[in-house]
Image: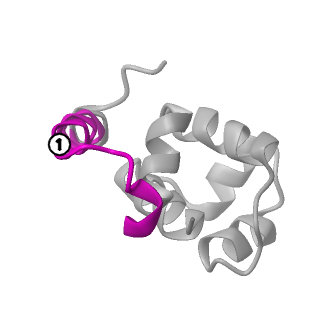
Amino acid sequence: MKPGKAIRTIRAARSLTQRSLAKKAGLDPSYVSLLERDQREPTLRTLVELSRALEMPLYLLILLASEADELKGVSEEQAQSLGRELLTILIAGSEFR
């Protein structure tokens, strides 16, 4: 799992700076930077706080962070459905609020 790219992608889609995301999640901005560069592994608790701050369901953050070999049990239909849901949330705004 590579959460850095997922965090950066969602943060950019939400027009948040690393500093503003860090503040919303109760984290240090330098830690967010390290996470986005995959130089630190977040705990589950950190991922939960980031998903809340990003207004993104945790399961979609984890899906976006997953690599192809980690999604072997996901059918093509499930992947398409989750992809549509993720795209809707990113483009239209969060229904997670």
Question: How many numbered marks, from 0 up?
Answer: 1
Residue 51 horizontal side relative to residue 85, left or right: right
What residue appears at the point 38 percent right and 56 percent down from the top-left corner? 72
Look at the numbered disc 1 and give the secondary structure of its residue: helix
Q: Amino acid at mark 1?
A: Gln
Determine if residue 67 is in view: no
Can residue 90 be seen here? yes
| Residue 37 vs residue 71, the one in the foreground | 71
Q: Is residue 73 magenta?
A: yes
Question: What segment carries the magenta color?
Answer: 68-87
Which corner quadrant of the image does residue 81 belong to? top left
**Residue 63 drawn above or below residue 33:** above
Q: Quadrant of the N terminus?
A: bottom right
Give x and y (percent) for residue 85. 25, 33
- What is the x, y in percent for residue 16? 50, 53
Residue closest to the eye, 23 or 37: 37
Q: Residue at x 62, y 38 (%)?
A: 53
Quadrant location of residue 78? top left
> Mark 1 highlights which residue?
80
Where is residue 51? Give x, y as percent: 59, 39
Q: Which percent across, then down, holds residue 66?
A: 47, 60
How crowded pointer 1 is (Cα within 10 Å; few <14, some 14-19, many 20+) is rated as few
